[in-house]
Image (cartoon, rainbow, N blue to C red):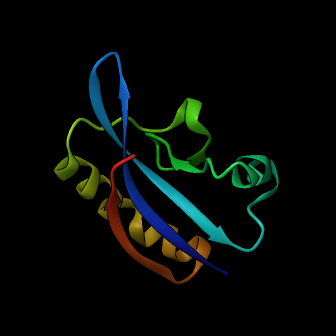
């Protein structure tokens, strides 16, 4: 099983936030399978995978990249090979 990491933007109340989306090749852990089906797996503020309602809202691209880097070893251990992160504006 591997995963793809994407740094994405979202806008709320005219403020742009950055979020980290994971796309896992294979089945997501039980409770997250619904979010995976909807393509809504994000890194939460405590480093767990969560849906859109609990995703970390980061205020800059630099902060999002640092946050992702801090959790990358944990994600690699849990999900195996990860494709290189990229930025994608939605």
Q: Is residue 70 above or below residue 3?
A: above
Q: Residue at x 62, y 47 (%)?
A: 40
Residue 24 at x, y = what percent?
63, 68
Q: Residue at x 57, y 36 (%)?
A: 52
Residue 69 at x, y = what percent?
30, 64
Decide if residue 4 is in sight here: yes
Q: Residue furthest top?
A: 13
Quadrant position of the N terminus in the picture: bottom right
Residue 74 at x, y = what percent?
48, 67
Decide if residue 48 is in sight here: no
Residue 10 at x, y = what percent?
38, 36
In the picture provided, is 62 more to the left or to the right than 56? left
Q: Nearer the viewer, residue 31 or 13?
A: 13
Residue 29, quarter of picture: bottom right
In the picture provided, is 66 more to the left or to the right than 4? left
Q: Nearer the viewer, residue 69 or 21?
A: 21
Q: Residue furthest right?
A: 30
Q: Residue at x 42, y 38 (%)?
A: 56
Q: Is residue 50 above or below residue 1?
A: above
Query: In this figure, what is the number of numbered marks?
Result: 0
Residue 5, quarter of picture: bottom left
């Amino acid at each position: 099983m591997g995963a793809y990491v994407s740094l994405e933007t979202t806008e709320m109340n005219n403020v742009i936030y950055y979020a980290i989306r994971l796309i896992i090749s294979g089945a997501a852990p039980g409770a997250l399978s619904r979010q995976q089906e909807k393509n809504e797996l994000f890194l939460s503020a405590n480093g767990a995978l969560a849906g859109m309602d609990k995703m970390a809202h980061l205020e800059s691209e630099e902060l999002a990249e640092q946050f992702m880097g801090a959790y990358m070893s944990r994600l690699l251990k849990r999900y195996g090979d990860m494709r290189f992160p990229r930025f994608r504006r939605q």
